[in-house]
Image (cartoon, rainbow, N blue to C red):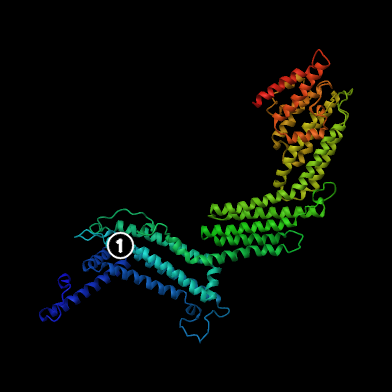
Amino acid sequence: IDYLSQGIDLSGIEVIENDLLFIARARLEVENQAKRLLEQGVETQNPTQVGTALQVFHNLGTLKDTIANVVDGYCTALEENIKNALDIKVLTQPSQTVTRGGPGRAAMPTPGNTAAFRAALWTNMEKLMDQICAACGQVQHLQKVLTKKRDPVSHVCFIEEIVKDGQSDILYKFWTAVTQTLSSHFQSATESSMFLKQAFEGEYPKLLRLYNDLWKRLQQYSQNIQRNFNTSGTTDLFAELQQMEEDIQDIFMQKPQDYDPEKALKDSLQQYEAAYLSKSLSRLFDPINLVFPPGGRNPPSSDELDSIIKTIASELNVAAVDPDLSLAVAKNVAKTIQLYGVKSEQLLSTQGDASQVIGPLTEGQRRNVAVVNSLYKLHQSILKVITNQSSFPAAAEQTVTTALKAVHDLMGSAVQPLLNSVGDSVEAIIITMHQEDFSGSLSSSGKPDVPCSLYMKELQGFIARVMSDYFRHFECFDFVFDNTEAMAQRAIELFIRNASLIRPLGEGGKMRLAADFAQMELAVAPLCRRVSDLGKSYRQLRSFRPLLFQTSEHIASSPALGEVIPFSIILQFLFTRAPPELKSPFQRAEWSIARYSQWLDDHPSEKDRLALIRGALEAYVQSVRTREGKEFAPVYPIMVQLLQKAMATLQ
């Protein structure tokens, strides 16, 4: 009938006037019934009803306009909902009747009524999220039916009818409209009301949680729609049903490539997030600035530190609603840890008295100990806070851990001057062994006259005093031992180095030196948890002692050689068994033992050390030839053989 009456004016023809009136009324009636069916079908998520209604509109040729009107209707209704949810006048009225304020009278909560205002606001926000969720679900449902329904005559899919004029799909159109409306209304509402602004900024995580929940519900919705379609049994109507991806983003059929619907939803929150993070940083920094007053000399007390840790834990807990927010707050926590480090570093004493090891603890050393203890407590407490966080994102954990590593490094640099001093003193004491006489022969009893040498007594006394006077005050035992164990390894290395250089070495001297080897274990014991933990250094100390009494041939075939004790040390030791003409490398170079020891520190590679020893052996050959000697010292061929073996292992 529409087709016949198109483009022709049939008014005034009495014969069909009543018929035309009837047709117009019939069309209206059909349209209204179809509209009701559509509304009901969408509301109850009944694809059969929706499909039937859409078929009617398709037959009447108004499918596209009807769909546009329906979507616009949802958008308008939601805009109204958003306005109402943020209406400060309604929110601040104790009763629901809205009285008009006088001219110029701002709507704001009465003092003492802020809590009620906030509660009303969050109730409104929850309701708004429900409304958005419901509307979005209905548009999704509509779109799903449009993508499935085909006209039985022409077999055209309904969605093609709507998209053919280059219009994007209806869900995308709806979603962009809703997210833009959210952004603009939130912005204008918070610009005009300080209370709304404070509520959204101060309780931003709450707002973010509502948005996250909404997003989760929408994804759930899309999966449910999917299931309803799969199980609704209306196979005649939806014969072309295919399995669709269970993801809301796939319901956006024609969204632009770079469009992220979740980001579009959260864009309206950016300004509140920035303000929240800025306030969060202030909350984290304030207690630190408070406990490090300008000109202060002492690190924070235990209680003050506890309050800082509580603040950190609280900020992280509140941010746990969202991984991105967790990461952002973790970055703030990292800045907080850095600030604590900087403030602590300013308290450290770096004057000469910080590294003295002669008298009792100085004021500066006492303060350094307190600073290290305070950094250690901070380090341990924050580690504990992180491990107690459930579902803490890996990136956030990494951010905080990196900041804590800097705290650990600062602890290290705070104790370094003291460690250097102790190390220097230990070296100075060990090198005095060369002032003692080890050339004597065995006494009649066959035992050494004294249990150990003087320098060893001094070393034992010094290490014991340093541990009780200085290191005992640190609460971070593991940290201290990690540092002092390295010192113990160095002390053993120096002891073996110097012991191998003693020349001349008599039988009585060997006995005393062997006793010193045993005493050395006792000397370094206070520096470590267990002496056996010192690994290679400990094995060297144990393996070298028996070599003192073995023949040169035995030594050369010892299994400890190269494995435990470096070849260069053994070769150095064999010089003591040679005549004075075969000079040690340092004697040939006319160096003091201290200078030779420094050279060895500067040249840790065996290759360099063996080259120096080879030079000494070659010089000896030269001197024997010069004086036209007939033979070399018995130990010389053994040393040459050892040197060749050592060079071969380096290859």
**Residue 484 appears in the picture as rendered:** yes
In this rendering, is residue 258 above or below 429?
A: below
Instruction: From the top left corner, tell me how far across and down residue 567 is, in percent.
Output: 72, 26
Instruction: From the top left corner, tell me how far across and down residue 493 is, in percent.
Output: 75, 34
Which quadrant is home to the N terminus? Answer: bottom left
Instruction: From the top left corner, tell me how far across and down residue 13 is, in percent.
Output: 12, 80
74 to the left or right of 90: left
Residue closer to the observer: 194 or 620: 620
Residue closer to the observer: 211 or 428: 428
394 to the left or right of 476: left
**Residue 452 appears in the picture as rendered:** no
Secondary structure beneath dot 1 equals helix
In this rendering, is residue 617 above or below 361?
A: above
Q: Quadrant of residue 487?
A: top right
In the rendered image, the residue lying farthest to the right is 444
In the rendered image, the residue lying farthest to the top is 630
In this rendering, is residue 81 above or below 455?
A: below
52 to the left or right of 648: left
Would you name the residue on which mark 1 appears? 163
Give the amino acid type for the residue marked by disc 1 in the picture: Val
In the rendered image, the residue lying farthest to the left is 15
Instruction: From the top left corner, tell me how far across and down residue 181 is, in percent.
Output: 43, 70
Which quadrant is home to the C terminus? Answer: top right
Q: Which residue is at a point 24% across and 68% down the rendered structure image?
A: 57
**Badge 1 density bin: few <14, some 14–19, many ≥20, Cα 10 Å:** some
